[in-house]
Image (cartoon, coloured by chain):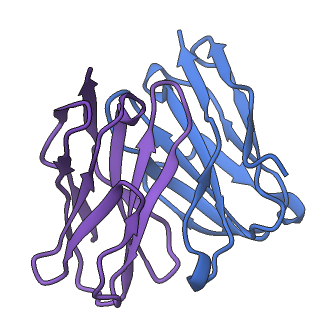
Amino acid sequence: DTGVSQDPRHKITKRGQNVTFRCDPISEHNRLYWYRQTLGQGPEFLTYFQNEAQLEKSRLLSDRFSAERPKGSFSTLEIQRTEQGDSAMYLCASSAGDRDNYGYTFGSGTRLTVV
Amino acid sequence: AQTVTQSQPEMSVQEAETVTLSCTYDTSESDYYLFWYKQPPSRQMILVIRQEAYKQQNATENRFSVNFQKAAKSFSLKISDSQLGDAAMYFCAYAYNNNDMRFGAGTRLTVKP
């Protein structure tokens, strides 16, 4: 297992287009998280899954955003009708979710630029 | 709501010297986790050190150690014998009850040769 993988690494899209990002977590990890990070800021929580169940969504996750984790493995994050304010780094992380091994492993992120 | 505050946007240190990065947090919980993450330029976030709130002993990982003051809700990171490779953004983070992690705004550390 090579860690958390995110695809693509970079995405440039025109305003109004839809984009989809993929995250492949560490295979033994049952929890998967999506964060958004703008330049010079810390990651902001968007949503997380335990297995295939989406357990929490941030207020930052507007109706244009949707995330899925079918079968509790990889996850996708879709942004519809992109806006310039959506430009950011989208980070995925996974964790085992147990008390004795608590901590996230992050992917390298997908940098989205909306022009 | 839990918040994490890093009051030092930027810090610099001379190579081989020691630097301390500050972090405070706000919570009403008694059992939680605190973390320091390192994010080098254009690279992924890496866990540096973690502290469980119910443990009084400060965590250490080689050159990295923390000063955890639970009553003051303070969680500072000390980097000893600083190396050029330590240059990065450092984020303090809080997590409670296996929920999602909340991050501070970060401190950019520069290491001068």
Locate the N terminus of chain B and report the quarter of the image it occupies.
bottom left
Instruction: Specify the farthest residue to the right.
Output: A71
In the displayed structure, does residue B80 sit left or right of residue A8? left
In the displayed structure, does residue A28 sit left or right of residue A14? right
Whether residue B59 is situated above or below residue A15 in the rendered picture: below
From the top left corner, tell me how far across and down residue B94 is, in percent.
Answer: 36, 67
In the displayed structure, does residue B72 sit left or right of residue A95? left
Locate the C terminus of chain B and report the quarter of the image it occupies.
top left
From the top left corner, tell me how far across and down residue B22 is, in percent.
Answer: 17, 54
| Residue B23 seen in render | yes
In front here: B5 or B112? B112
* Chain B palette colour: purple
Whether residue B47 is situated above or below residue A43 in the rendered picture: below
Whether residue A69 is situated above or below residue A15 in the rendered picture: below
The residue that appears at 35% across and 56% down in the rendered structure is B64
Quadrant for residue B65, please give it: bottom left
Quadrant for residue B9, please give it: top left
In front here: A108 or B18? B18
| Residue A62 seen in render | no
The residue that appears at 50% across and 54% down in the rendered structure is B47
* Chain A palette colour: blue
From the top left corner, tell me how far across and down residue A59 is, in percent.
Answer: 43, 55
From the top left corner, tell me how far across and down residue B74 is, in percent.
Answer: 16, 69
Whether residue B39 is situated above or below residue B32 in the rendered picture: above
The residue that appears at 35% across and 36% down in the rendered structure is B89
